[in-house]
């Protein structure tokens, strides 16, 4: 005659062996802590399995909406920005189109050379040679005068 008797079973939480004394219901967990953890997981799974309207968890995958904003930087000409309309903008044609003045001595010298050519060849410039000459004389006076100091005063002035 063969008789079987439960001697040990593994904890349903951690899998560690739990001895069975042979009396009463066989233990399912090695400790009250593991019994508690198993119950928490089981009840949480039950709660999560309910419909979303009853506090359950959605089975839908997480979705994201990404908004894409592209910033384009482009230069634009602002007319009379920050100054009265009475102040003429030197680098602006009568048509309102901007143009570029020479930026350094070499460019000014080249511009003046161009003026000498234009004064005799360009029908838009030639009729105003006298006006241009007057402007050149004023320019000459300034060019040949003494340089003002850093603070804007002319050396020699009180
Ligand atoms: Zn355990």
Image (cartoon, rainbow, N blue to C red):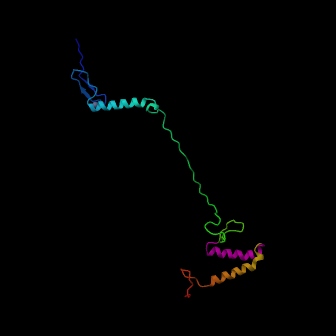
Where is residue 25? Give x, y as percent.
Answer: 25, 21
| Residue 143 falls left or right of residue 56 | right
Residue 92, by quadrant, is: bottom right
Residue 58 in the image, given as x and y percentages of width and height: 46, 33
User: For residue 85: magenta?
Assistant: no
Magenta residues (range): 102-123
Report the number of numbered marks.
Answer: 0
Q: Is residue 125 above or below residue 61?
A: below
In the image as oriented, which residue stretches furthest toward the top? Answer: 1
**Residue 36 against residue 108 in the figure, above or below:** above
Does the image show residue 92?
yes
Q: Quadrant of residue 96?
A: bottom right
On screen, residue 51 versus residue 34, left or right, reads right
Across and down, in percent, residue 3 comes to 23, 14
Task: Quadrant for residue 116, please give it.
Answer: bottom right
- At 48% from the left and 38% from the top, the residue drawn is 62
């Amino acid at each position: 005659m063969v008789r079987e008797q439960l001697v040990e079973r593994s904890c349903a939480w951690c899998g560690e062996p739990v001895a069975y004394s042979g009396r009463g219901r066989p233990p399912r967990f090695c400790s009250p802590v593991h019994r508690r953890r198993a119950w928490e997981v089981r009840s949480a799974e039950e709660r999560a399995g309910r419909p979303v309207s009853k506090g359950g968890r959605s089975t839908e995958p997480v979705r994201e909406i990404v908004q894409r904003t592209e910033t384009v930087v482009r230069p634009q000409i602002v007319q009379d920005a920050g100054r009265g309309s009475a102040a003429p903008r030197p680098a602006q044609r009568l048509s309102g189109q901007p143009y570029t003045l020479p930026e350094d001595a070499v460019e000014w010298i080249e511009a003046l050379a161009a003026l000498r050519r234009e004064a005799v060849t360009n029908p838009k410039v030639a009729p105003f040679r006298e006006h241009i000459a007057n402007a050149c004389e004023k320019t000459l006076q300034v060019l040949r005068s003494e340089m003002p100091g850093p603070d804007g005063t002319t050396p020699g002035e009180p």
